[in-house]
């Protein structure tokens, strides 16, 4: 690998993280200022992004996007991933944004990798190593600072926002773990494309995508298209490409800038209050990701470790 390829991989991983972070802030803008329904946005985003990803997968040579449906067991796994992984993580994350803000919701979701570590520790019946214990303390401390600002008497976000933020982290962990076997056999774009499209299709029975909500003007369309194009398609493509050039460990570590990008854009664009305790809590949770990435043995997980 040449130095130019490695540099391009680093730039792509950072770009993917920034795209994801800004996407969350665009969602907050649509919820707060344009009254766009959370469930509708999730449904339409999944349907459009999933259809385009499937189209890309079908256009590739030597790729059979329908092969997975020929195996009942794999088809069942894909359905579980689509509903309880892809759809669940998207909805819990966006609803957490609605209840709090993009910065807080994104940071809370980033405790998800800690649940992944806990799952594998239980599965393999091993005690966590020192880096994992340190990550646990940092994650708990960071979350405490983020939601209480250091006070033992009250929360600075609603209890609902905290619950949905933690649910977002749990569904992120499931999203990361559940499709491992499928991703060892099938192309990541195919699995993600099917996951998005099926998740959106299932959700459309409850949230008709043709019934739009909110105030639609130029700013609404700009934020909506950003979420679809940059926050879904390009972010996913850039991250996958970066993994092939710099490896999953480095790419995942670089994607830790996502909460920072979400926080900065939310503060500068939407004037979200983000004080010293918020930044300190964010730093603690980011250190968690760094410790888990550098201090533990890499495992094969979902190709896209952040679905935001």
Image (tube, rainbow, N blue to C red):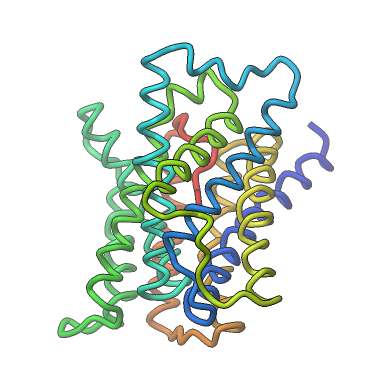
So how many labels did they put on this image?
0
Q: Quadrant of the N terminus?
A: top right
**Residue 22, image x, y percentages:** 60, 67
Position of 207 relative to 65 (above/below): below
Q: Residue furthest top?
A: 70
**Left or right position of 151 against 198:** left
For residue 251, which quarter of the picture?
top right
Residue under the image location 41 percent in, 18 percent down: 74
Q: In front here: 222 or 166?
A: 222
Query: Looking at the picture, how far across and down is residue 292, in whole percent?
Result: 41, 47
Residue at horizontal 69%, vertical 49%? 234
Say above or below: 125 vs 270: above
Image location (x, y in percent) of residue 144: 27, 72
Q: Residue at x 45, y 61 (%)?
A: 286
Residue 138 falls in image quadrant: bottom left
Specify the quadrant of the image occupied by residue 143. bottom left
Q: Is residue 146 visible?
A: yes
Whether residue 267 is situated above or below residue 42 in the rendered picture: below
Residue 260 visible to an observer of this rendering = no
* Residue 62 place in picture, x, y as percent: 71, 15
Residue at 67 percent of width and 18 percent of height:
63
């Amino acid at each position: 690998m040449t130095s130019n390829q490695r540099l391009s991989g680093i730039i792509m991983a950072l770009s993917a993280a920034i795209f994801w972070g800004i996407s969350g802030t665009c969602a907050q803008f649509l919820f707060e200022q344009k009254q766009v329904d959370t469930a509708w946005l999730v449904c339409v985003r999944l349907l459009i992004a999933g259809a385009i990803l499937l189209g890309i997968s079908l256009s590739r040579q030597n790729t059979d996007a329908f092969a997975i449906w020929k195996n009942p067991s794999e088809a069942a796994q894909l359905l579980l991933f689509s509903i309880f992984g892809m759809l669940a993580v998207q909805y819990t994350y966006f609803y957490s944004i609605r209840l709090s803000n993009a910065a807080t919701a994104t940071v809370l979701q980033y405790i998800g990798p800690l649940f992944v570590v806990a799952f594998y520790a239980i599965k393999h019946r091993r005690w966590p190593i020192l880096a994992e214990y340190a990550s646990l303390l940092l994650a708990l401390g960071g979350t405490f600072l983020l939601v209480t600002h250091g006070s033992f008497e009250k929360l600075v976000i609603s209890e609902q926002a905290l619950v949905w933020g933690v649910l977002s982290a749990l569904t992120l962990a499931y999203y990361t773990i559940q499709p491992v076997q499928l991703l060892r056999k099938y192309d990541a774009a195919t699995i993600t494309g099917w996951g998005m499209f099926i998740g959106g299709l299932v959700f459309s029975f409850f949230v008709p995508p043709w019934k739009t909500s909110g105030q639609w003007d130029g700013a609404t369309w700009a934020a909506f298209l950003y979420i679809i194009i940059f926050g879904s398609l390009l972010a996913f493509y850039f991250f996958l490409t970066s993994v092939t050039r710099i490896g999953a460990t480095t790419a995942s570590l670089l994607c830790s800038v996502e909460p920072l990008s979400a926080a900065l854009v939310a503060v500068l664009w939407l004037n979200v209050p983000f004080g010293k305790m918020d930044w300190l809590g964010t730093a603690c949770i980011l250190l968690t990701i760094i410790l888990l990435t550098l201090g533990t043995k890499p495992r094969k997980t979902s190709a896209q470790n952040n679905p935001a």
